[in-house]
Image (tube, rainbow, N blue to C red):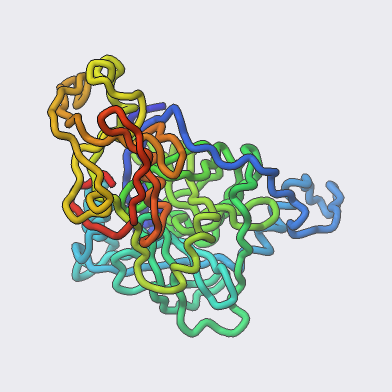
Amino acid sequence: MNRNLSLLALSGTLALGAFAGFELSERSSAQVTGTAPAVTAQAAPTTPAVNAFDSGRARTESEANTVQVVKDRQAGLVYISVTEQAGGSEQAQLRQQLQDQFGFGLPEGDQGGVQMGTGSGFFVNTRGDIITNNHVVEGASEITIRLHGSKQTYKAKVIGRAPDFDLALIRAEGLPQGAITPIPLGDSSRLDVGLKAIAMGAPFGLDFSVSEGIISSLERTVPVGTKEVNQNVIQTDAAINPGNSGGPLLNSAGQVIGVNTQILTGGSGQSAGLGFAIPVNTVKHLLPQLQAGGELRTPTLGIGFTDLSAVPQDERQKLNLPATGALVQQVYPGSPAAQAGLRGGTQTAAQAGSGQGQNAQIATGGDIITAVDGQPISEGDDLRRAVIGKRIGDTLRLTVQRNGQTRDVTVNLQAFNIPNSQQ
């Protein structure tokens, strides 16, 4: 994989597409989605058999299915426009920085530092709840939506946000009766590589664009959300671009299987043909909390740690450390980890081969977390994912090595803000 490739969030700025960028590092061991039977097309919208030569319209069975899925689900798609004051939020500052970097100037005629952004979303129920990406609406001073096939705009407001999962729920005001057409939610645990994937949205501000591909991988993790924790995503080769953010990824049954969120690009910002979607099961898990309103906060252990899988083997052997696990460097006072009695490192040692050839300092003598809720830690992100997947008030059972002895520690998880912490 080209090390210059970057992950770009897909919100567009006018039709030019400014987006938030993240570096993607290649990983040899990724989380694997469940291998339950694939969702079949039994629930798909049905169409009468089409004669390949009827009226000069040659259609394969797959084409007929795609056409019908699009016709049946297009009314559930929502186009989102946001307005924000430049520099008025971290998101606005980031967009301005990326505009400067990629040469995307402010819109012609724009006055007073106001920036416009675009994105996509979709109805998830008859109440008019709309799911989109958090990065589409974060920092917005005004949000408006349009429905497919209409130029009428409606003001919308954010009901709930889950920044650590890059998801948000918004509702529009004054929608006419019968205008809300929810798209059914599928089951992302029942997917298989090779199944059809249909992306709908408004890339580069172009209303209602549809692209088709397949599910390319279910073994991919990429940085998602404000904490940039590597989370499981669906990889697809269906073309998605800036402005597709928050739009649905559908299967052949016309069900939402993911929320389009990022693309892999080269150094020039051009698409590398790889798109990523947040699995719909994440949406279903978080939907009740989003509907309750406010910002969904995730718990924090309150530690800094070193991922032992990233430490060179000779250094691990020299320091008598296991091959995998989280070596606790620091435990922050008052944190859930501190209340559970976890200990940080007390002795400084050099870690060779880090920091572009320079030795890095790590602290030994602290606790080594080897498993979470009975699941072994193969890399540091296993611990991050376990914590971010819990709710405030939940407990986490850590298997910990200390002075050659192994014990289990129960941590009561809470929200805990610390600067520059790892988890």
Residue 179: quadrant of the picture: bottom right
- Position of residue 364 relative to residue 110, above or below, is above
Q: Where, quadrant-wise, is the N terminus in this rendering? A: top left
Please state which of residues 122 and 396 is positioned toward the viewer in this rendering.
396
Q: Residue 348: x, y in percent?
A: 13, 28
Q: Residue 120: x, y in percent?
A: 47, 62
Which residue is pictured at 44% across the width and 74% down the height? 292
Number of numbered discs on residues: 0
Q: Residue 170: x, y in percent?
A: 44, 71
Which residue is pictured at 37% across the width and 42% down the height? 408
- Position of residue 261 relative to residue 77, above or below, is above
* Image-based side of 239 in relation to 325, left or right: right
Which residue is pictured at 32% across the width and 31% down the height? 405
Q: Can residue 347 be seen in this view?
A: yes
Which residue is pictured at 34% across the width and 56% down the height? 412
Residue 114: quadrant of the picture: bottom left
